Structure formats: C-alpha cells, structure tokens
Image (cartoon, rainbow, N blue to C red):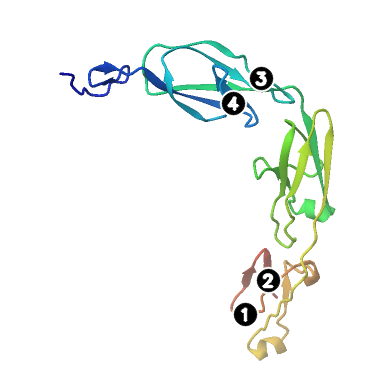
Amino acid sequence: MPQLVNYDIDHLLVFGYPQSFTNVQVDITPPEGRWRLDNGPWQEGGAVLYNVPLGGHTISFSEVDGWNKPEDIDDLTISSYCGAIALSGEYEAICYGELTVNIKPTEAVTDGAKWSVDNGEPWHDSGETIELIPGEYTVTFKTLNCWEKSESKPVTVVCDEEVIVNEVMELMEPGSLKVTIIPQEAVDTGAQWSIDDGMTAEKHLIYLAVTIPLRSKIFQIGLNRLIFL
C-alpha cells in the first residue's frame, strides 16, 4: 500500500507517486512588460503559474515601446519538482528623455530648495538636468522652513526630448515676536534685545509671543537666537 513520505527539496512523493507539476514565476523590469508560457495568456511581472507540467517549455516576452525586450527562453526544461522555478526578464531602454526643474526665487534656493523624482533620492539642485527612461513621473519638492510647501507635479518623459518644470516657491506670511524684559529697573537702565546679533526682525518668521526673564542670556526659537544686551 502506498505511504505518505516526507517532503524533499528535489522530489515530492505523494502517496508513493512522483509529483509531475511545478510552479513558474517571472519577474519583469519595467512593469509594462509581460511574459507568457508556451504561447499562453500574457502575465504581469511577478505572476506565478501553478501546476506547470514537467518537461520542455518556452518563456516569451512582450514588445514594449521604447524598450528592447529580453530574449525569449526557448529551452526551459523542468525535469523535477523543486518548489518553484523563478526567472527574470529585464528590458533595456532604447532611449532616454531629460528632465530639468528650475526653482525660484533665488532666496528659496539659497535656503536649500531642492527637487526629486517620485520621492526618491538624491535631491537635485535647481536647474539640474537628469536623464530618465520614458514614462510617467512625479516631481516633489523639499520642505523648507519659512516657505510654503510646493505641490508635487506629474510629468511625462518621452524619448530624446527635454521636459522643463518651473516652480515658484512662496514665502510664508511673517509673524511677530514679543519679548518682555523684567524687572523694570533693568529696562530703565538700558536693557535691550536683538535677533541674530542685531539682524532686523522683518527678515525672520517667528510665530511665538514669549516672555523671557533677564537671567536668560540666550533664548532659542526655531532658527533664531535672541541676544540680550
């Protein structure tokens, strides 16, 4: 009488009979590519075909505009069950497009304004041009203190053409700062305060109203430093 035996990585016996099927998975780059087994229906990258019979098979790859497709696999031979057959197909871009992003005003660039593609790294400087494979992308902008956050912008990159994105960042509305020095006797004798070693408050965006004792020599608010004289 047949007996159930333990699983073996090279062969699987179920009730004493060899397993004659396996699974096939093919990963593809880019995601627009498709693959199929033995002229069957097209599959997305990463899809798994179950219960593939042992023996000889063919893996075919679809055509994708702007890409050279991988060579078809004409001699795939599955001779034993091994859990799953994992394959990959990597397309090569036929051409590239260019993306340039300009950020204004100059003050925002000086403060560190940068951009990236699809929230990725690295961050790029204003005016920098990069090459990209044709496709749909999203341009995102770095968040800066004192500047309004810029909205992400979708772009379409095509072969042998340059896409230019112009972004104008806006400064936040300025706030106000109130500093009270105590005791009054100190004020009467000339106690004063300044921002960032004497720079005018109009150049800074401060959103807190605070009362600071005279004994506090330096008080930190955001990026600004108060100096008591």
Q: Is residue 14 left or right of residue 116?
A: left
Task: Look at mark 2 in the image and give the residue it sits on.
Answer: 226
Label 1–label 4 contact, CB within 8 A: no
Asked where in the image residue 135 lies, by quadrant, the reply is top right
Question: How much space separates mark 3 and mark 1, taking CA atoms?
Answer: 69 Å
| Residue located farthest toward the front when viewing the structure as drawn | 1
Amino acid type shown at disc 4: Trp
Label 3–label 1 contact, CB within 8 A: no
Amino acid type shown at disc 1: Ile
Question: How much space separates mark 2 and mark 4, taking CA atoms?
Answer: 67 Å
Label 3–label 4 contact, CB within 8 A: no
Precedes in sequence: disc 1 or disc 4: 4
Q: Is residue 87 left or right of residue 5?
A: right
Secondary structure under tag 4 reads loop
Q: Residue at x 74, y 25 (%)?
A: 66
Q: Residues within 10 Å of mark 2 (few under 14, many from 20)?
A: some
Precedes in sequence: disc 2 or disc 1: 1
Task: Look at mark 4 in the image and give the residue it sits on.
Answer: 42
> Disc 2 vs disc 4: which is toward the camera?
4
Question: How much space separates mark 3 and mark 4, taking CA atoms?
Answer: 14 Å
> Disc 3 vs disc 1: which is toward the camera?
3
Task: Look at mark 1 in the image and give the residue it sits on.
Answer: 212
Q: Residue at x 66, y 83 (%)?
A: 181
> Disc 3 vs disc 4: which is toward the camera?
4
Q: Residue at x 64, y 69 (%)?
A: 221
Question: How much space separates mark 2 and mark 1, taking CA atoms?
Answer: 10 Å
**Which quarter of the image is occupied by the N terminus?**
top left
Amino acid type shown at disc 2: Leu
Q: Residues within 10 Å of mark 4 (few under 14, many from 20)?
A: some
Residue 32: % across, % down: 65, 31
Residue 142: % across, % down: 70, 51
Label 2–label 1 contact, CB within 8 A: yes
